[in-house]
Image (spheres, rainbow, N blue to C red):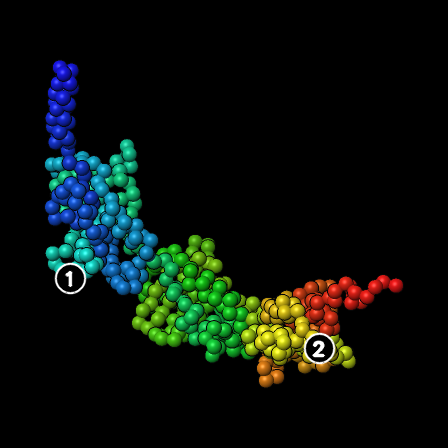
Amino acid sequence: MRTSSFVVLGLAVLGQWACSRESEKPPAPPRLFATETAEPTRGAPAPAAPVFTHLTVKARGATTELERTPEGWRITSPVEAKADPYAVDAMVQQLTTAKFKATVNAAPSDADLKKFGLTSPNFTVTARAYVPDASGGGADDPSRQRTVTLSGGEENPFDGSVYVRRDGDATVYAAEGAVRWSLDKGPFELRSKEFLGPLDAASLQSIEVTAKDHAYLLTREADGKTWRMVKPEPTRANASRVADLLTAFAGQQALSFPEDTPAARKALGLDAPLVDARFVTTSGDPIRVRLSQVTRDGAPVVHALREQGARSTLAEVDARALTTLDVGVPELKDRRVLAFAREAVRQLEFHPGGKAAPVVVARGSSLDGGSDAWRIEGPDGGLARHFRVVKLLGTLESLRAAAFGEANVKRWERYGISEASRSVVLRDADGRELARLWLGHAVPEQDERLYARGSGPDLVEVSASAVAALPTSAADLKDAPPGGPDGGAPSP
């Protein structure tokens, strides 16, 4: 009993000592951007994260004003431009979550502030935000508005932290080095470098380019998906290649943003550009982009001027931007040999060549086979192997030109292509021709290629192996008879 009493007494004394030590601990350093109007009580739910609406950043000898818009953050001063989402997100993240690392001096003198670099701060950030209510609102509620101004001074060489103060608080704090990295940003760091975009292919109706070596005009087809080359020769355009060009061009990064003046444009050669591109969209003003090249300190320097309506942006860009759109007709042409809607095909004619009868298969004409069946209609009857026909359709749909030959051919016979050539005809339910493929002679010195004619006006070269599986007889489309080629008759 005596031992138990000593234990209880000891625990009581230790508890009082622990409580007293707890009360003696200095308060934890506050957040950079405190949203609470009073010290939160133990166990209370965490306050909602602030929603930032305005940022004023004084750093690198300039002041940058940023505003949150429905389309994202934009710079409103010293220029009107889209903000770099990654740089602004990093800044907002630090303001939302970061805490001061330690309290350095609760009552600094003027000499102390000078020592910490806070008499003339290296950077100052004024952030405005609101604390959303339970439904996410509160943007216009004055009681929910919060504003803080943070000033950053010198870096502590011992641990890389930075000395920071807040307006209305005399204390000098230490913050992690990541705070300085995120907040100490000038106008160029905060500005989006992808200034040529967006060039959304889905909204474009035409693309006209005049470059150093090539010029072309592309227009969107009526289906809203494919493209057609209008100049220098009318033909189908390669939609995926067009999309790749737009992506590469819009992704060009600005290396700097020189002052845009008439004198600067003339000095940089933009009055006689090496590339002049015009993009017409479904809505809004057309976009014009000019690129020029000058020599600076013995090295070529490329500049781009983007104009849309009353807005213009001048930037220095990588020299590779000059060649992004400077591509020729072969690269822009659609390499599909045949253009047809696969779901519309109801009949295929495989012509072996010469005077041999074609192998004709039709879909949905067999009562016993069902609407999805493919039936051989000539030269004899029977069901075709369904997956064999489907695979052939896929082969024809995916057939691509390995190279382009003569344009607008007048004498196809020179290449072994005539009405008697080996060919394939695709027809719809009414018997109308959807597409036709002719196969001609082997390409000289190209053992694996054949001359071919497809949906376009030009001669193309195709891989011989890609068309090797095209049937030449009805047996190629049927299952082999059971027991062997003689139908299972006993051997003599």
Q: Nearer the viewer, residue 259 or 287?
A: 287
Please identify the quadrant where the N terminus is shown: top left
Q: Is residue 30 visible?
A: yes
Q: Amino acid at mark 1?
A: Asp
Mark 1: which secondary structure?
A: loop
| Point 13% across, 15% down: residue | 2
| Point 12% across, 41% down: residue | 170
Reply above or below: 486 against 14.
Answer: below
| Point 59% across, 75% down: residue | 370
Q: Nearer the viewer, residue 363 or 208?
A: 363
Q: Is residue 455 visible?
A: no
Q: How many marks?
A: 2
Q: Residue furthest right?
A: 492
Mark 2: which secondary structure?
A: loop
Q: Nearer the viewer, residue 446 or 17?
A: 17
Please identify the quadrant where the C terminus is shown: bottom right
Residue 414 in percent (x, y) is at 73, 77
On residue 140, which mark appears? 1
The residue to which callout 2 is attached is: 381
218 displayed left or right of 140: right
Residue 321 in percent (x, y) is at 46, 61
Q: Nearer the viewer, residue 45 or 115?
A: 45
Residue 145 in percent (x, y) is at 15, 56
